[in-house]
Amino acid sequence: MKNKYSVFSLIKNALSYHENWQRAWKDPAPKKEYDAVIVGGGGHGLATAYYLAKKHNMNNIAVVEKGWIGGGNTGRNTTIIRSNYLWDASAGLYDHALKIWESLSQELNYNVMFSQRGVMNLAHNLQDVRDLKRRTHANRLNGIDAVYLSTEEVKKFCPIINTSPDIRYPVLGGTLQRRAGTARHDAVAWGYARAADAMGVDIIQNCEVKGIKRNGDSVEGIETTKGFIKTKKVGVVAAGHSSVIANMAGLRLPLESKPLQALVSEPVKPIIDTVVMSNAVHAYVSQSDKGELVIGAGTDDYVSYTQKGSHQIVEGTLNAILELYPIFSRMRMLRQWGGIVDICPDASPILSKTSIKGLYFNCGWGTGGFKATPGSGDLFAHTIANDEPHKLNAAFNLNRFVSGDLVDEHGAAAVAH
Amino acid sequence: MFLINCPYCGERDQQEFKAGGEAHIERPKQPTELSDDEWAEFLFMRKNIKGVQFERWNHAHGCRKWFNMVRDTSNDEIKAIYKMGEKPPAQ
């Protein structure tokens, strides 16, 4: 990398009042032709481009993004990272990502502020208890760290939780994954963009895809707002807008796009040093390094691309949060926003080839894609470069909706959906 | 959040309703003769349109009746509402 970030570069630039830092990535006009084009400059798309260049020597590639990089769901999620999924296929996929997270800052020479502060999932009824215990055992069989906590142990780990037995959603126990945690979402997009750019990847912002040109059953290129780009391989990583791109190519996907909301409070002193998730009541809370409480809510049940959700969804989440954390009752919320999440019927992602040669989709991450960013990019790059899935994402193909071999994580893993 | 004009009860808060997904997906007439591909198409594949979409809704906390809606999913604007069995309005 040309301008390596280090304590020396920091001192050097401090001496010139930080006025001489170089651009982290270029702003090129699109070339006429690329070996591959990634549609979507979020974390997953940029990671895909990075691994295509790094591991598969594909340097003549581009990422096209209709807005600015990291401005979609990458910049809108609650940054939770964990791998405690129930099924073997999911455990393999998400733990692959978690292992990359553990050394990502060093690899990218960019501080993604990965913080393994632990993620706790609470059980609020007897079925939750049974499900979470089962998931803990399944995780340990798959080599993923997981422990089941009693109500007292939950209280000890996070003292501000109200564990009184007479509340609306009593805490009957919980699970803890200590390797799990959070990362800085923008830094992930920027870090991958900078590293990909350094290897020759063109990152083209404000370039919206308007059409996919096919010659029979093969891809020939994409029509964009910056002109036609010829390419034989197109990897679509467009999250909530995946169906829009699929419709351009005459494909249908098993997705529904719905608004998912999050909100942050005013910043306060450190009060919660872990991530607590209550899946039964859709209340997820952690604290950012700035001191804001970062709160995740549930999705609306109707299809919408409006990037705003219903008020009652936020109200329901905050009701549950106030019951569980009475200490937050006087907190004021600063910002609230929505992102459009693409949800599969089995709540598992699609990283797959399609019936059209050279067209690949990475979508369906639903409400929980951020955690998988590095692993998703790595495996999708493998799929595009070799025209074959890696063994870790083989189960996440489009054909599973025909064969019936679904990866049914919906509720089964007490995951956040 | 928006208001929905239930064809049976009149204008109510969207909170009273349950979205039922894409409308006019016809149930297979001969289920035993369907291939796996056709089942996948019927069960899972959706248009998921950004723009004007035909949907089913249920007044779950009201009359509990189903009806159809034409809605622009890019801005949540409701274009038309019509009862089950009625022909969709021309767009």
Image: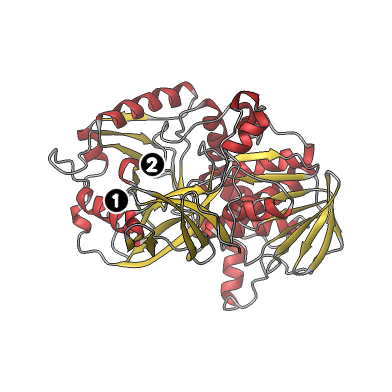
Mark 1 packing: few (<14 Cα in 10 Å), some, or many (20+)? few
Would residue A311 be visible to someone looking at this image? yes
- Taking depth in this image into account, of A69 and A268 the one nearest to the observer is A69
Q: Look at the image and tell me whether residue A109 can be seen.
A: no
Residue A42, position in %: x, y?
Answer: 61, 56
Specify the quadrant of the image occupied by residue A351: top right
Real-space Cα distance between discs 2 and 1?
40 Å
Indicate the position of residue A203 as horizontal and vertical percent values.
Answer: 72, 62
Q: Which residue in the structure is indicated by mark 2?
A: A118
x, y percentage for residue B25?
Answer: 57, 43
In x, y percent, where is residue A392? 63, 31
Relative to A91, say whether B72 is above or below: below
Give left or right: position of B1 versus A322. Answer: right
Name the amino acid, label 1.
His
Q: Secondary structure at mark 2?
A: loop
For the residues tagged 2 and 1, is the chain the same?
Answer: no
> Measured along the vertical axis of the image, is residue B15 above or below residue A206?
above
Q: Residue at x 55, y 45 (%)?
A: A365
Quarter the C terminus of chain A occupies: top left
In the picture, measured across the screen, residue B29 lies left or right of residue A183, that is right
Check residue A275 in the rendering and tell me which mark sits there, or answer none: none
Local crowd at mark 2 within 10 Å, few (<14), some, or many (≥20)?
A: some
Determine which residue is flagged by label 1.
B61
Q: Which chain hosts label 1?
A: B
Q: Nearer the viewer, residue A288 or B52?
A: B52
Left of B88 or right of it: where is A354? right
Is A339 rendered above or below residue A181?
A: below
x 86%, y 46%: residue:
A216
